[in-house]
Image (cartoon, grey):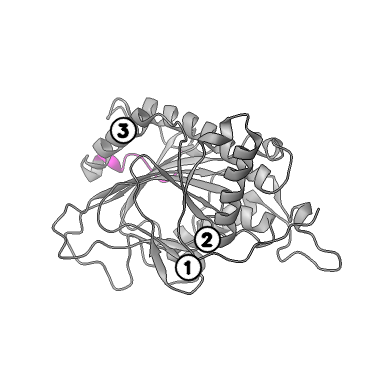
Amino acid sequence: MQYTRHPPANGAIPEIDIAPFSERDEKARDLVAARVRAACEDTGFFLISGHGFPRALLSRIGEASREFFDLPLEQKRQVGESGPVPGGLMYFGHGAEALGATLGAELIGDFKETLDFGPGFHGDAWPCEPADLEPAWRACYGAMSELAQTLRHVFARSLDLDADGFDKLFEGHLSSLRVINYPEQTRPPRPGQLRAGAHSDYGVLTILATDDAPGGLEVLKRDGSWCAVPHVAGAFVVNIGDAMMRWTDDHWVSTRHRVVNPPRDSTRPTRRQSIAYFHNLPRDTTIACLEPFRQAGRQPKYPPITYGEYATLRYRQAHGDDKNLEL
């Protein structure tokens, strides 16, 4: 059955209660799927509540990560951007990543530092300090992977696919967890420098928990204006990435987004910490147009490419051509 796209909405970022999707009421499940589908066609961004994620896990990983970011720089740098340890930790210092460069902007380092982990990636040995760092991260990663599976099932229903239609494609997935520290800006940013430059995510979906602090996430609307993503206590921000957009032949959109600098005259603390889970395909999985989006007599917009090839391309754009992504 060929997919039919609805007219674009107004670009607002909806909040969707996904709790009914876990019930047996098929009409309730269809309503959740329809709301997610509308959001994915419009901006590719939405908030989710009713997810059942253990809030204590977010507090735990947040506290342990903040302790790491507050360590002396020399101690943090003992964790490198890559390493020999499967499932190790990766640290990217201030300005080490330039996300805007992935979409052709000037290579200007983002005003942030990050920690990254994924069981399928190589990094350095986990540091002894903070003591709870590795246990907190592994527990949070596991819970995020379960939530991502639920969202995969919602997406499958939205696309009229079998409930587990995506599951086999994610066996051995290369998902990753990232905690981002946006520090107080004690000096003015460089011209054109943001906390995170405008970019799109290159995986299938992203789950994001944010702080309520000045200088936050913005999404580019269809009319060319930027829209601030609201902070809703207890809710996650979810967005789809380039892989999903390619699968749907642009019927679902992977929207540009950025993290702006806080106002210089803010009367509130501006340090901000975000927790992001990137749900990615296995390295050798091919990203090609799904059957519902194939039209007779017309080639899909994107040629097939493996996730590993696409991820490596985008990584080098963000980190420089001399860097390799160890998948």
Most foreground residue, 84 or 250? 250
Most foreground residue, 98 or 7? 7
Above or below — where is 54 with respect to 289?
A: above
Residue 168, x across and y down, in percent: 71, 35
Task: Name the residue type under label 2.
Answer: Thr
Q: How far is disc 1 from disc 3 in space, using C-alphas?
A: 32 Å
Question: Disc 3 vs disc 2: which is toward the camera?
Answer: 2
Picture residue at 51% right of the left edge, 60% below the top = 200
Which numbered disc, 1 or 3, marks the residue that appears first in the sequence? 3
Q: Is residue 196 left or right of residue 165?
A: left
Which numbered disc, 1 or 2, marks the residue that appears first in the sequence? 2
Query: Is there a contact, CB below 8 Å, between mark 1 and mark 3?
Result: no
Above or below — where is 93 with respect to 57?
A: below
Task: Name the residue type under label 3.
Answer: Ser
What secondary structure predominates along the stretch shown in magenta?
loop
Disc 2: which residue: 43
Identify the magenta region: 75-83
Query: Is there a contact, CB below 8 Å, between mark 1 and mark 2?
Result: yes
Residue 178 visible to an observer of this rendering: yes
Disc assigned to residue 221: 1
Assess whether residue 82 is covered by the magenta stretch.
Answer: yes
SS of the residue at dot 3? helix
Picture residue at 56% right of the left edge, 50% below the top = 35
Disc assigned to residue 59: 3
Residue 42, x across and y down, in percent: 55, 61
Q: Is residue 157 left or right of residue 259?
A: right
